[in-house]
Every structure is written in C-alpha cells, then in structure tokens.
Amino acid sequence: MNRVITGGYVATVDEQGTEHADGYVAVVDGRIAAVGSGAVPEEFAGLERVDASGCLVTPGLVNTHHHLYQWATRGYAQQEDLFGWLVTLYPVWAGIDAEIVSATAKAGLGMLALSGCTTAADHHYVFPRDGGDVFGALIDAGRHIGIRLHAVRGSMDRGESEGGLPPDSIVESLDDALEQTERAINEYHDPAPEAKIQVAVGPCSPFSASLDLMRGAAAVARRHGVRLHTHLAETADEEEQCLREFGLTPVDYARNLEWLGEDVWLAHGVHLKEPEIALMAETGTGIAHCPSSNARVGAGMAPISALVDAGAPVGLGVDGVASNESGGLAEELRQALLTARQRGGPKALTARQALRIGTMGGARCLGRDEHIGSIEQGKLADLAVWRLDTLKHAGIVDPVAALVFGRVPPLELLLVGGEPVVERDHLLTADEPSLTRELARASARLADS
Ligand SMILES: [Zn+2]
C-alpha cells in the first residue's frame, strides 16, 4: 500500500549519514519514492499518512546469522564453552523434524520482526535422516511471517568417526550434502532485487565439514551465483584445532579453500589478527558479528572497530538462540556498542556506526546493499518506525542514541517492501498465541526425546 510517513526523525544511513529531524518518507509500490525534511512534496501529499511524530524512522535491521531451529532448545548448557555447548546440544538437535523447524522458524522470525528486523539469514545445518523436509519448512515459515529470508543450506559431513565434533547420526554424506544443496538453490533461490527468499550455501564449520565439502560447496555456490557462509574464527579452541590438524589458522584455512571474497560472509571472526582484518577488507569478505552469543559462551570480543575502520563488510547477528536466549536484533545494536567499547574504549564504536552495521553492513554481507539497508529513493521500502516518546525514552536528546544506548523501543510500524508486518508491537502476519503454543510444544518434544 502507498503511504507517506511524516513528522518523525529519519536516520537514512545513506553514505553521508543524512538525518532529517522533521522528516518524511514516501512509499510507492513497495519502494521509497522520496525522503526528505519538512513539508511533504505535492505529488505525495495525497497518500495515506502515517504520523511518526515522537518516533525515529530507520532502515529495517538486517540479521546476518541465525539458527532458527534452536528456538526449541533454549536454556541448555548454560556454563559451557562453545565445544562443550555443542556436544551437549547435538544429541538434542538430532530430534528435530519439519514440524519443529516450522514452529521454531515462525517463532524466531516473528520475534526478529518484532525487534525491527526486515531481512534475516538463517544457517540451517542439521538434517536428521528421518526429519522430513526441514529446509522446506524453513522456507514456508519465511513466507508466512513475511520478512526477507536468506536461507543458508548448511551441511556437516564430518561426524565423530571422522574426527569431527557432531555425532554421526546427524551428519550427511558428502554427496548427499552437495546434491541437496544444489536442489535447494534450484527450488527456492530467487535472484530478483525484491526477492523475499534467497538461498546461500553454508557448510557448518572447520570442525564439522570436510575439506571436500568446503571445496564442493564453494563450487556449487559459484556455479549458481549464490553466496557462501560458514562459521570461522569463533573460539581459541577452533584455532588450536585448525593449527593442529591443518597447520593453518582458520583464516589461512579459508583462504586456501578460496573461501574469502565478495560472495562470502563469515559468522563471528572473533579471533582475527591484524593482517587478517586487512585481508577481510581487501577481499570484501563479510563478518556477521554476534556479540551476545560470543559473550554467552565466553568466546571473546570480535575486533569490530578495526574491521569497520578497515572497510570490511560487518553485519550483526543474533546467532542461534540456544546461545542467546533473547533472539531480538535491536538488542544487538547495544551489545555491539558495549562490546566494542569494552575492548577498545569509549570511542571504539558510535551509536551511528552500530546502526550502520545493523542495517547497511548487514545488507553488504548478504549482497543486497543496492536494494536494502538504507532509506534512499528507489530502494525497497523496508522501514522500522520506533516510538521514542514513552517513559522508556522521552527526553533522550539524540534519537539514534535512544535506540542504541537505551532500551529497545516500542515498534510503531515495520514495513517490508511497503507491506506492514508489525504494528504497535503486534505481529500482523501470524497469531502470537498460536506461535507460542507451537513453540512450547516443539521445545517439550525435544526435551523429552
Ligand atoms: Zn552460529
């Protein structure tokens, strides 16, 4: 529906960081037709008006790393590091099936929408043999909730018997993993600029995917022109294992496999060293920064300020909620800012830089920056309207600081391609009590299995 949002503080996150204290955004046919200050231009004056006085208007947030199925396994392994946490959870995840993925993905995408997210990547790499069509269930959930979904067809082929971390029962054979990845691309990937569903390729990690799978997956992705994603340099343990097994750091391992480049984004990058930070920028390799998850498993603090200063694409991620029981993306703006400052002092990251990585940075990681990530004429109308005139935020002198330093504000409106998905903190595309019941049932089924 066409409309014009008026009277709000508009943070466009364009190249110059333009902001309009009394701004308007006109939305026509799913795209941004105009953005500016003061009176609405004549040609848009007749559109339906959305009064955004007392609100901050930002681009919709972009989530670059998630595992939606983990919504059914929150609260486990609370004091474990990454490897201990994984070893505790793999046997639980072995029980997932299409019904559980449907319930968790709807719940997780709904919660992302309620936290201002309009585009989300989900890295799904657990395919139990009798689990049914879990990837299809993920795609259906994306269509149902209505935010843009980058479904990463993950894979693991290196079970315990091959020196990997996961139990053999939840890994695929190399051939199956590659074949099913190609099938997912053929069936679901939409290359159109306004795509709601895109597919990427994502062997899980160096400790669960073989060299052949890493190489084969890259070949499949490049043959189809889709993006590549994996976990890398998350913990010190991973680095030790890579050095022991391959005589290489995780980044050198990835470079040898041609897993650096503009079509690649990597989850975490916590343990990048200085030359590796420069390499990310030089190669255009993106980093999905997941500060809450990194903190929960005590993985360390990623060098985000240095990556941003070097010009590498950096986006935000909630990561799976088994290592981040919240699952809200707006919260990660604040966590990213605080984490950067714990590491590098009070000038390490500004509120505006945090908002930029949560929007444009994420769009760059996903290869969508031409079409989403900022409020500019011609881009898709993916917009978040945050209410800042309640007890939570009234009087904070800077609206962007209110969003990033303060509590997560009430979400007045969330538009995806101009279509409302959230209004006044209510999800319009699904019934929240039903999502809650289905999520509780899925969690209980896994806890009992
Ligand atoms: Zn992850």
Image (cartoon, grey):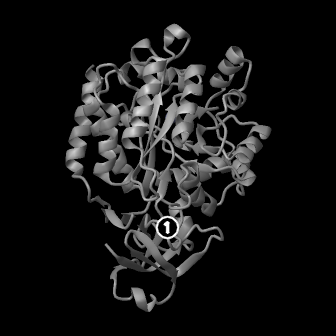
Residue 434 spot, x, y in % from top left: 20, 46
Query: Would you say residue 425 is visible in this rendering?
Result: yes
Residue 102 spot, x, y in % from top left: 28, 38
**Image quadrant occupied by the C terminus:** top left
Q: Residue at x 78, y 40 (%)?
A: 274
Q: Could you say which is closer to the camera, residue 277 or residue 324?
A: 277
Is 371 placed above or below 63 here?
below
Whether disc 1's CB lies below 8 Å from ligand 1 is answered no
Q: In the displayed image of the protein, which residue is found farthest to the right?
A: 275
Q: Residue at x 51, y 46 (%)?
A: 64
Q: Residues within 10 Å of mark 1 (few under 14, many from 20)?
A: many
Q: Could you say which is closer to the camera, residue 213 or residue 242?
A: 213
Seen in the image, is 218 located left or right of residue 171?
A: right
Seen in the image, is 216 located left or right of residue 283?
A: left
Q: Residue at x 62, y 47 (%)?
A: 339
Disc 1, SS: loop
Query: Would you say residue 106 is visible in this rendering?
Result: no
Name the amino acid type tagged 1. Lys
Residue 299 spot, x, y in % from top left: 60, 32
- Residue occupied by mark 1: 379
Is 321 placed above or below 82 here?
below
Q: Residue at x 33, y 50 (%)?
A: 110
Is 384 placed above or below 260 here?
below
Is 281 placed above or below 14 here?
above
Count every numbered label the image shows and give the total: 1
Residue 9 spot, x, y in % from top left: 50, 76
Seen in the image, is 374 located left or right of residue 244?
A: left
**Image quadrant occupied by the N terminus:** bottom left
Q: Could you say which is closer to the camera, residue 278 or residue 187?
A: 187
